[in-house]
Image: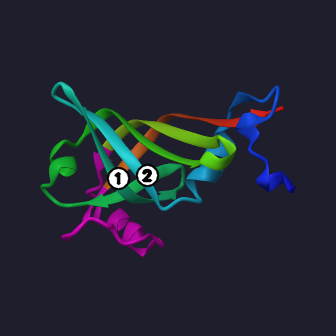
Amino acid sequence: MTAAEVDMKNLPGAHHVAEELSEAECWDLLGGQLVGRFAFLSGNRIEVFPVNYVVDDGIVYFRTASNGAIERAMPRDSASFQIDAFDPAHAAGWSVLVSGRAERILDPARLVELFRLPMEQPWAGGLRVAFIAVRPVTVTGRRVHMKI
């Protein structure tokens, strides 16, 4: 039996271990994904939207619809962007959370630069030309895995 075939969850003495990720590890993970979740408080409820994104110079950017729910809610002094991945077979995974200020980018020169960045087309339908920036105040992450 190979290590990949072992069900870690059922091994005697196996237990979950959570490890904090360094900020550098968090940024490495942020640079390797295509989709994350953007969240902010709207009234009495937390709104969460999946978005395609790009990281540039320590800031998370994504495109949304002009006058859509996200763009209408800008700016926000407190918003979050989250990515994660998991492996159910090995009871392992990781999560990264970027929290800070979110705002629409209005500077024409910066918009030209952002449109030139390699970025997945937004999966949501319709025209997505409003760029939102999430300017980090905190970047945290953790990895969970099984240990024998």
Residue 39 found in image quarter = top left
Cα gap from disc 2 to disc 1, whole angstroms: 6 Å
Asked if labels 1 and 2 touch by Cβ distance under 8 angstroms, the answer is yes
Image location of residue 103, percent across then percent down: 29, 45
**Which amino acid does the dot numbered 2 rest on?**
Gly
Image location of residue 36, percent across then percent down: 43, 52
Per the image, label 2 sits on a secondary structure element best described as: strand
Residue 116 found in image quarter = bottom left
Residue at image location 37% in from the left, 63% down from the top = 110
**Which amino acid does the dot numbered 1 rest on?**
Pro
Residue at image location 84% in from the left, 52% down from the top = 3
136 or 106: which is nearer to us? 136
| Quadrant (top left/top right/bottom left/bottom right) for the C terminus | top right
Please give the label number shown on residue 136: none
Q: Residues within 10 Å of mark 2 (few under 14, many from 20)?
A: many
4 or 106: which is nearer to us? 4
From the viewer's perspective, is residue 82 above or below residue 13? below
Residue at image location 60% in from the left, 46% down from the top = 88
| Quadrant (top left/top right/bottom left/bottom right) for the N terminus | bottom right
46 or 8: which is nearer to us? 8
72 or 106: which is nearer to us? 72
Image location of residue 137, percent across then percent down: 48, 33
Judge from the rendering whether residue 90 lies leftward or rightward of residue 83; answer left or right.
right
The residue pinned by badge 1 equals 50
Per the image, label 1 sits on a secondary structure element best described as: strand
The residue pinned by badge 2 equals 36
Query: In the image, which residues are magenta?
Result: 103-131
